Amino acid sequence: MNDSPGIWITAVPPFGAEDVGVLLSVDTASADPGERAVNGLLGYGHEGEEGVCYLLPDDLAARYARTGDRLAVTLVTARAVLTRCFAEQPALLAEFPGDDEWVPLLRRELATDFAPAEQDGGLQAVLLIDHTGPPASLDALLAGFETGDCGIAVLNAR
């Protein structure tokens, strides 16, 4: 299985050259229901440092899973949050059927030996960078953050 586009294990310069973690990208212009839902939920973040927002764990969170040498990251939201935030978009809600408490929105994976560190009783946060268009190179995404064309969200890991 090939690596998913839009996932990197890297240090993000604005947060420190030694702080290696998982970075996911999400296209703000995507027609994919999962990316559309993630983009909509990003509007509920709380801004910290300039260009960086933090989301409540029920609004949008990340789940890590490992199978052999592959690390998968799935972005999830609480069903109640999804229903409340997209009540006026029934076609989008229909893309996420079921009644599970947690709804998977987007999944990315890659082959790596990286193991997320434990922090404050949970796993290391995932950084999500939003951009317009297909996933660019990592350097282009980070440059877009520096110029204000991309934003970064910090997602708690479950």
Image: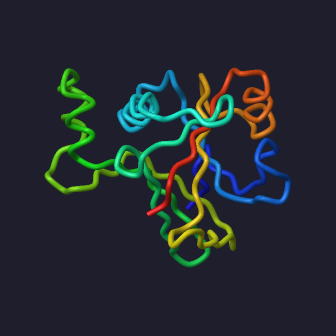
Q: Residue at x 58, y 57 (%)?
A: 125
The number of callouts visible is 0
Q: In x, y percent, where is residue 57?
A: 41, 52
Coloring scheme used: rainbow
| Residue sitting farthest toward the bottom | 68
Split into 4 quadrants, where in the image is the C terminus? Answer: bottom left
Q: Residue at x 75, y 37 (%)?
A: 137
Residue 109 figure quarter: bottom right
Q: In x, y percent, where is residue 126?
A: 58, 53
Residue 41 figure quarter: top left
Residue placed most toward the observer, 48 or 79: 48
Q: In x, y percent, where is residue 140?
A: 78, 31
Residue placed most toward the observer, 70 or 9: 9
Split into 4 quadrants, where in the image is the N terminus? Answer: bottom right
Q: Residue at x 39, y 28 (%)?
A: 40
In the picture, measured across the screen, residue 41 lies left or right of residue 72, that is left
Relative to 34, residue 146 above or below: above
Residue placed most toward the observer, 20 or 56: 56
| Residue sitting farthest toward the right | 17
Relative to 93, residue 126 above or below: below
Q: In x, y percent, where is residue 150?
A: 66, 27
Q: Residue at x 19, y 27 (%)?
A: 87
